[in-house]
Amino acid sequence: QSALTQPPSASGSPGQSVTISCTGTISDVGGYNYVSWYQQHPGKAPKLLIYEVIKRPSGVPDRFSGSKSGNTASLTVSGLQAEDEADYYCKSFAGIKFVFGTGTKVTVL
Amino acid sequence: EVQLVESGGGLVQPGGSLRLSCVAPGFIISNSWMTWVRQSPGKGPEWVASMKPDGSLQYYGDSVRGRFTVSRDYARLSMYLQMNSLTAEDTAVYYCATQDLMHAFDTWGRGTLVTVSS
């Protein structure tokens, strides 16, 4: 199972928005509405940001939003803040298995 | 806040074995799907294995199937990952996490480092 494709990096100034794409296939992203997104700061465990494509767990700011079109899911971070600088990974259910994305490093300029 | 605590990592020689543990609150061990995820240095996370609450179903990633086994001990409030025939490619931080019904990994431990080297 190949990893989902994400851009290696993205950046924006405080207050701006960044959108990260996550491209898979019909066997994973395109076939299920079970895409989730995770934020990971250096030396820390990943943290769930988005699940079921668009839903946010309690406590996650509404600056984080998700969407999906066909085989590509996206995470948008609006109103960038310094603490948003981190690595971001998508993950998709793929029928009794899971596949993560390659990861995107977000830099707040 | 739910806390998961992994242990058992360390240095092991190629071809060796290691068993990781994940301690969780009783209501988690008894009622939640649980999963192992690993992350090699400088790489993204990789799903390793998941297990149904009653232990009747486990499924594994392609890279570990046949070598790794996941299990639970309800009395000890623990989940385990038995790892055999280890290679350098298994070097990683291993995390345990809860897996909700919508297939999201919603609570994570801090991880335990496994290094496979001679």
Image (cartoon, rainbow, N blue to C red):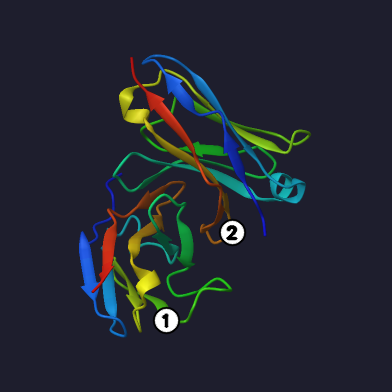
Mark 1: amino acid: Arg
Q: Nearer the viewer, residue B24 or B9?
A: B9
Mark 2, Cα crowd under 10 Å, few <14 / some 14-19 / many 20+, is few
Query: Quadrant of the image for the C terminus of chain A?
Result: bottom left
The circle on residue B101 is 2
> Which element type, helix, strand or loop, lies under badge 2?
loop
**Whether residue A29 can be seen here:** no
The answer to whether B39 appears left or right of A52 in the picture is left
The subunit carrying tag 1 is: A
- At x 53%, y 28%, the residue is B69
Residue at (28% x, 66% y) in the render: A106
Residue at 54% across / 62% down in the picture?
A: B102
In-front residue for pair A32/B15: B15
- Write down the chain letter for disc 2: B
Query: Which image quadrant for residue A16?
Result: bottom left
Q: Position of residue B116 (x, y in %)?
A: 37, 23
Q: Taking B47 as reference, is A13 left or right?
A: left
Identified at 47% across, 68% down, the residue is A52
Residue B48: quadrant of the picture: top left
> In the rendering, which numbered label is found on residue A63?
1
Q: Is B52 left or right of A74, judged from the image as shown? A: right
Q: Residues within 10 Å of mark 1 (few under 14, many from 20)?
A: few
Q: Quadrant of residue A14?
A: bottom left
Say yes or no: labels 2 and 1 on the same chain: no
